[in-house]
Structures are given as C-alpha cells and as structure tokens.
Image: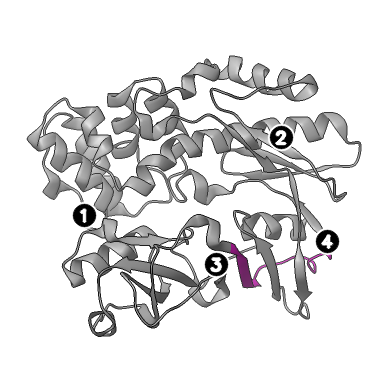
C-alpha cells in the first residue's frame, strides 16, 4: 500500500474548541499548508512577520506530506499583517482574536481523508485500532529521533549531535547525503554552508558549535523548543510501542504483526479500554506491565531515574496513553484498480497512518 504518494492523497483537518472574540492579545488563524512541517511553516511565518517564532502556538504538529489545516495563535500580530502573508503552499485564513494562546488541550481530534494506492485487496472494515506512535514520531525519513533522545537522557550529548548530523539514511536526497558524509570526515570543522538551507535544524546545531565548540548540550538546546522536548518524548514513544506490542502478543491469541521503521507492531481487532504506561521517573507499575517494561528497560540499559534528566525541559515523570482507540465515522469508498479512498475521525494524539496499516492487514 502507498499512502501519501501524492500530496493531495492525504488530507487532515483539526477539530478544535476555540472561542473567538473581536479583540484580544492573541490573533487566531487557520493555517492550510502542503509540503511544510508545522515547525518549518511557523519559522517561515515568523521570518515574514519579523517576529520571534516563540510568539506562535499550535494545538498539534502536522506532517509535511499532505494537505493539512490547523489552528494557530500568534501574540500581538494584527489582522492586517496576517492577511499580508504570502508564502508558497501556505494559505492563511484570519479567524479573530482571543485572550489566550492556543494550547494542546483544546484539540479534540482530527478528520482525515486519505487515498490509498497500490492495494492488492480492498481495505477492511474495523472499529478500533491499537494506539501506537508511527514513524513521524521518530523523525520520518530519518527515524532515529528516539535514539537521539536516549543519548541525551544518558548525558551523551556529542553522540546525540552526531546522530542528528551524520549517518545518512537511504531515503535522503543526494545533497543531504553529501553534507552528512562531509561532516563525518570533518568532525569539528563547523562550516554551516556545507549543509543545504533546507536542513534548518542541522544548520542551527552547526551554527551554535561554530560559536561554542564542544558545547554539544548547548547546541541541542538551540533547537526549536517543540523539537527539543520531542527528544525525550520520542524515546518514550519507542518504549511504549515496543512494550505494548509485547504485552498484546503475550495476552491475545488472535493478533497480527505489521512491520514499520523501528520493528514490528502487534495489532488486535478486539476493543479493550485500558491505559498503557509512557514510562518516566515516577511511574509505578504492577504485574505483567511491570515485568514487560522493566525487562525492556534492562535491555535498553536504562531505568526509571534515566528520565530524571539534568535538563529540566527533558525530564519526564511519566504518564499513560490509551492502548486502543475507537475509529469514528469510518467510510470506505469503492475499491478500483488498486486504489481506494477512506475517511475517518480520530481523537487527538492518534495516528492516521497506524489506522491505514490496520485497514490493509
């Protein structure tokens, strides 16, 4: 199955609780984009508006591949300036004003419209799915963000920076590969111009190191805050996926496995309402859950206190996440010549690409 083969094949729109007023310190607008990640789109908006990107707030991150609509707030930028924005593949719709920045808690969920191609058989009808994190959580075309996060939690900052800058993946373009290969052979020679301008975050790391050689911790802290805090979250997400897959395989006779960038995911079609831990330094585990997660942590060479990171922004007490979620408003169109359209609604935090994996199986 091919998903996101074309930009128009993947559409997502946020469903948000937003109270709009005629006046307020925060301006709300709808950001429609394609070929932009949320973080890079906000960087572009900040540059054109001549404001710090920290003035912007969103309720969630959206992928680059697809047409996405999401709500954005910006502090003390008026309607006139918003309407003057002109950026390729970005459309801005002014909504109004408010007294608060948009926050994660306001997001109820997302509506998806997806075209699946290269199918060997029609997609199946299902009502629920295991609530895994998908490749986007781990870096997308460079799915190693979880390993970088682990290195940072262990205080191995230079290794973390190397993982971010070096070791090209087969999916990367030739200019990206060339830049990473050059840096492998010239480690410590911090020449930002060797990296393509589109590698924005890599260039931030190198620019910091050019000013502060050997300050690898500071270089990582120079990353956009949402990306920086994602380092711990990505590693926790890997542990969540792997431990939950082991639990399901151990406890259910009817299951099926699907490969993804980090290994195999175990799916079941029977809905059960329970939470699964996202482990942190305050996690209190019992029974099979404790055995499975502690066994995995021993394999990984970490323990609960690992998440008590010396960088406060990366420390995590731990929390839980629904192990399975219900799929709402699922509609499958006619299967024809290996192509089928599908639409559905998911609660916040759930991955449409995980649903697509389950629909195909």
How busy is the neighbourhood of tag 4: few (under 14 within 10 Å), some, or many (20 plus)? some
For the N terminus, the image quarter is: bottom right
Distance of label 1 from label 2 (alpha carbons): 39 Å
Say which of marks 3 and 2 sits in front. 2
Q: Are marks 4 and 3 in contact (CB under 8 Å)?
A: no
Q: Is residue 176 above or below residue 317?
A: below
Secondary element type, mark 2: helix
Residue at numbered disc 4: 126
Q: Earlier in the sequence, mark 1 or mark 2?
A: 1
Looking at the image, the residue that sits furthest to the left is: 211
Q: Which residue is mark 1?
A: 196
State which region is magenta: 108-127
* Residue linked to disc 2: 244
Mark 3, residue position: 4
| Label 4 or label 2, whichever comes before in sequence order | 4
- Left or right, 104 with respect to 334, comes to left
| Distance in Å between CA atoms under marks 1 and 4 | 43 Å
Q: Is residue 180 magenta?
A: no
Q: CA distance from mark 1 to mark 3?
A: 24 Å
Task: Give the secondary structure at mark 3.
Answer: loop
Point out the tag, 1 or 3, that comes first from the N-terminus.
3
In percent of width and height, residue 290 lies at: 72, 20
Residue 354: percent from the left, percent from the top?
66, 54
The mark tally for this picture is: 4
Looking at marks 3 and 2 on the same chain, the residue that comes earlier in the sequence is marked by 3
Q: Nearer the viewer, mark 4 or mark 3?
A: 4
């Amino acid at each position: 199955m091919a998903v996101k083969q074309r930009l128009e094949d993947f559409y997502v729109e946020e469903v948000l609780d937003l109270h709009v007023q005629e006046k307020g310190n925060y301006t709300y607008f709808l950001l429609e984009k394609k070929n932009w990640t949320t973080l890079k789109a906000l960087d572009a908006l900040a540059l054109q508006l001549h404001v710090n990107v920290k003035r912007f707030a969103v309720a969630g991150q959206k992928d680059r591949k697809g047409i996405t609509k999401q709500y954005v707030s910006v502090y003390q930028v008026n309607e006139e300036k918003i309407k003057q924005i002109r950026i390729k593949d970005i459309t801005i719709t002014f909504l109004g004003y408010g007294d608060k920045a948009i926050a994660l808690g306001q997001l109820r969920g997302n509506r998806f419209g997806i075209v699946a191609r290269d199918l060997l058989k029609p997609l199946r009808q299902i009502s629920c799915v295991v609530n895994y994190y998908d490749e986007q959580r781990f870096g997308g075309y460079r799915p190693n963000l979880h390993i970088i996060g682990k290195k940072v939690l262990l205080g191995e900052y230079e290794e973390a920076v190397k993982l971010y800058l070096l070791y090209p993946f087969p999916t990367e373009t030739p200019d990206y590969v060339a830049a990473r290969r050059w840096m492998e052979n010239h480690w410590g020679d911090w020449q930002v111009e060797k990296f393509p301008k589109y590698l924005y975050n890599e260039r931030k790391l190198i620019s910091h190191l050019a000013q502060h050689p050997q300050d690898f911790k500071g270089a990582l802290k120079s990353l956009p805050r949402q990306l920086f805090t994602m380092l711990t979250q990505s590693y926790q997400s890997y542990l969540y996926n792997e431990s939950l897959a082991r639990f399901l395989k151990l406890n259910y006779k009817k299951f099926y496995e699907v490969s993804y960038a980090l290994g195999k995911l175990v799916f079941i079609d029977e809905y059960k309402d329970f939470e699964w831990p996202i482990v942190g330094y305050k996690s209190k585990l019992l029974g099979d859950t404790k055995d499975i997660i502690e066994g995995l942590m021993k394999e990984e060479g970490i323990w609960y206190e690992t998440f008590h990171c010396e960088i406060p922004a990366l420390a995590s007490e731990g929390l839980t996440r629904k192990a399975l979620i219900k799929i709402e408003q699922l509609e499958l169109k006619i299967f024809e010549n290996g192509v089928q359209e599908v639409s559905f609604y998911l609660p916040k935090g759930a991955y449409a690409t995980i649903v697509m994996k389950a629909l195909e199986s």
